[in-house]
Image (spheres, grey):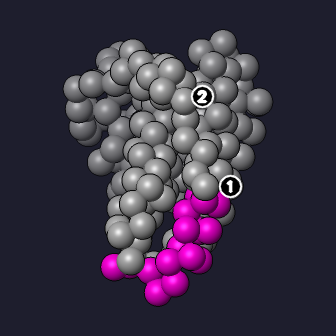
Amino acid sequence: MARLLPPQLFFLLTLVVIIHPSYGLKHLKGTALVDEVCRHTSHSEYCVNTIVPKPPLSGERIASTTLGWAQIKALEAGTIIASLLNDSSSILPVAKNPLQAKELLQICWDSNMNTMEDLWIASSLLYNKIINPMIARLYHAANTTRVCQDGVKGTGFTALAAKIEDIIKLCEICVVSTNFFVNGAH
């Protein structure tokens, strides 16, 4: 049985995402800092196409922006998982064994809840410039998300797989950009 968020908690999480400073920013292209940060990630093209922090551009703004987007992707993944868990007919076209699929989705739900918690704590730590624990939370969020990623490989849950991959990439970009502003590189 899926453990869904109480309506009040879902509302609070949605509100936090909406008022997050990185929400709704204009796209910046071709900046040397974005190129430099992205060059240090495993997915530089994704990074360059994704980063759109608010001017003035800094490693801290890139970190804040990507962390906000990771939070949004985690919320979106949770919505997809809840929808699949609540509507068994949506699992049938993509699952050879619906019972195994439900068990996998429950694992994904649990790991996504842990990921969301890590991302929200990381955001608070970033805001307060408590960097090492923030980075540890980001690594934990990415690793927890990989639990679900490993399970959905080869299944028909493509929308969920895409959100999960985005969360992992955004966590990495956040760590790399944090290193830029912590180490005074930019």
Q: Is residue 60 visible?
A: no
Marks 1/2: CA distance? 16 Å
Taking the spot 54% from the left edge, 24% from the top edge, the residue there is 9
Q: Which residue is located at x 41 percent, y 71 percent?
A: 91
Residue 128 placement (x, y as % from top left): 66, 12
Q: Amino acid at mark 2?
A: Trp
Residue at the outermost top position:
128
Q: Quadrant of the N terminus?
A: bottom right
Residue type beneath disc 1:
Asn
Residue pointed to by mark 2: 120
Asked where in the image residue 180 lies, by quadrant, the reply is top right
Residue closest to the eye, 185 or 98: 98
**Which numbered tag is attached to residue 143?**
1
Give left or right: position of 47 versus 169.
left
In the image, residue 87 sits, relative to residue 127, either above or below, namely below
Extent of the magenta region: 93-108
Instruction: Determine if the magenta segment contains residue 173.
Output: no
Asked whether residue 91 is in view, the answer is: yes
Residue depicted at x 47% and y 87%: 96
**Circle nearer the N terminus (1, 2):** 2
Q: Percent position (x, y) of residue 66?
A: 46, 36
Camera-side residue of 34 and 120? 120
The disc placed on residue 113 is none
Residue 155 point in image, percent of width and height: 45, 78
Q: Position of residue 99 (x, y in %)?
A: 57, 76
Looking at the image, which is closer to me, 108 or 39? Answer: 108
